[in-house]
Image (cartoon, helix red, strand yellow):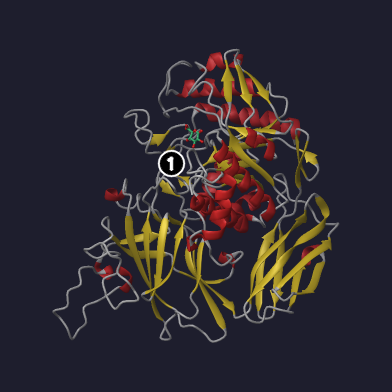
Amino acid sequence: LKMLPPALMVLVALLFGSSAYAQTSLLQNAPGRSVLSLNGRWNYIIDPYENGFYDYRREAFDQSKSGKGGYYDNQKPSSTQESELIEYDFDQSAGMQIPGDWNSQDPKLLYYEGTIWYKKSFNLKPQAGKRYFIYFGAINYESHIYLNGKKLGMHKGGFTPIQYDITSQLSATGDNFVVVKADNTRRPEEVPTINTDWWNYGGITRDVFVAETPATFINDYKVQLAKDAPGTLAGFVQLSGEGKANQSVTLNIAEAGIKQTMKTDAEGRATFSIPAKKLKMWSPQSPKLYAVSLSSGGDAVQDKIGFRTIQTKGQDILLNGKSIYMRGISMHDENPLIPGRARNEGDLRMLLTWAKELGCNYVRLAHYPHNETMLKLADEMGLLVWAEVPVYWTIAWTNPATYQNAEAQLSDLISMGKNRASVVVWSVGNETPLGDPRLAFMTNLVKKARSLDDTRLIAAALELHRTPDNVVHVDDQLGEFLDLTSFNEYAGWYWGGKPSEITKYTFDIKYNKPVVVSEFGGDALAGYHGDAETRWSEEYQEALYQSQIKMLSTIKGLRGMTPWILADFRATRRQHPVYQNGFNRKGLISSTGTKKKAYYVLQEYYRQMTQKYD
Ligand code: GCB
């Protein structure tokens, strides 16, 4: 297999890939359905030897044989056989809050990488004529999920939703239990790979619920403006279930006076293109959302959707036809005050409020898909979004399963975000090292993204290189396939000398496209003071931001930036015992929530850009 050219490898992947990535299409707007929340306390068992999965000969407990032992059975000693040997007990094990990473909830789990088993019992009596889907917003990284002792499936990828139809598996009495094996072991061929610059938070990190639908239901929909066409609503509604063919579906946007009924085809799909001349456009200054309702037979879904166009023209980015400057900031899906993964709407709102205070109209949700709630909040608060998949650094470019995994994560991200006006950029990866296999892998992802959604811009953080004449060259071949030219540029931190020295650099950019710098920055420990040449001090970071802004302003096509990063975040690689202590300190806001000096430099620059463009 190693001998095949990369493009062929990808083909092989598509034909023979493992089923871990193929899930039935995700329920659109799943949290907006009728749901039974399974959030709250789950019992857990730490299992570094995977004792609940393999016997002492390292053979998996097999559900097809009668052999007991797998923790998913949630066994109890029977009252008639008190001599029975069972060496685990979920109900007497400790509890943990879900959603929530395990690292921040138990000191002995801070660095843990391996398997943890979770169990939750719940009461749900299935009703005739209904369907039920169990839905996990995200589990990092590999999960095996069981309901009432039966396996539902295995999933890889720590940041995208997982969903199974459990209609026929629910117990008639209403007593059910779900068991999850979550394993965050890093592996070279996974996405991301073993090396990243963020914390490998494990466990069930986002909401869990059971969604109920009628037997025939609205599975998916897209209601957006057609590509570059402000006067036309375009999209589709997809029904699932036995009665899906030849059904009436109604789209209603009462406030805009739009009501259209259509018929589904044999596949249960109705596509539409509707004139919509009078819609008020969504923008960061005026994030107008319309109540949109879709109904068909016994099913109805409500959403709040904004409408806008996004396109590029030469070096301009046009939002609703008007040139904009993207005043951005990068962020992780982490609440630095815990510190741990953001758990709920409150955590997410805090992060976006910080970005708004900074003067942003744009956020880069690095380096993996963030919570669906985050995208909805960005819609509501008026922030443009760059959304990304964890194709980061040294991915196993020639491994077909790795490609398939990356593509599945990209598809699920696009499925989850496609109705959000805020999302204007899909990013297919970050700082991936040059080479032919990488170019083939990345361009395939670009093609995939375009095939799934032709209405948004496609980007990636490109590589750059320098020549002795102090020129920074951006000519990474991947740039040809993208809509924006973006790169991470660490002058004044990793190269280029002190902050005062970097303004000597100029840029030679091969592409006539808008330049949106995806990163620059440097670490500062909040409260540590020195002068502009004292590394780790707030003054150094402040000077670095001043020089960076000066230097980047010489780029003719500069149309935005997302400096690295809104807040300090946990990163295992960051080991300086005084200044870092397990944190990447490039935040403009510290891990206790205080604003560093550089915050105000960027805020002032964004004030000027607002005056210039808005
Ligand atoms: C980068 C990476 C980001 C790191 C950052 C750093 O280029 O994209 O994930 O955290 O640099 O601090 O070095």
Q: Is residue 90 above or below residue 157?
A: below
Frontmost residue, 435 versus 494: 435
Quadrant of the rendered structure where residue 605 is? top right
- Inspect this view and state whether residue 422 appears: no
Q: Does residue 534 appear to the left or right of 488 in the view shown? A: left
Q: Does residue 525 appear to the left or right of 43 in the view shown? A: right
Quadrant of the rendered structure where residue 487 is? top right
Q: Is residue 334 above or below residue 24?
A: above
Q: Does residue 414 appear to the left or right of 174 in the view shown? A: right
**Residue 418's spot in the image, x, y percent?**
66, 56
**Residue 437's spot in the image, x, y percent?**
55, 40
Frontmost residue, 522 versus 427: 427
Question: Which element carries disc 1, helix, strand or loop?
Answer: loop
**Residue 449's spot in the image, x, y percent?**
65, 50
Residue at (52% x, 35% y) in the render: 565
Q: Is the residue indicated by label 1 positioned so its CB lies within 8 Å of ligand 1?
A: yes
Residue at (82% x, 57% y) in the render: 232
Image quarter (top left, top right, bottom left or bottom right) of the C terminus? top right
Q: Which amino acid does label 1 sit on?
A: Trp
Residue where numbered disc 1 is placed = 198
Q: Does residue 448 appear to the left or right of 513 in the view shown? A: left
Q: Is residue 6 above or below residue 602?
A: below
- Inspect this view and state whether residue 146 appears: yes
Q: Residue pushed farthest front?
A: 3
Q: How crowded is mark 1: few (under 14 residues within 10 Å), some or many (20 or more)?
A: some
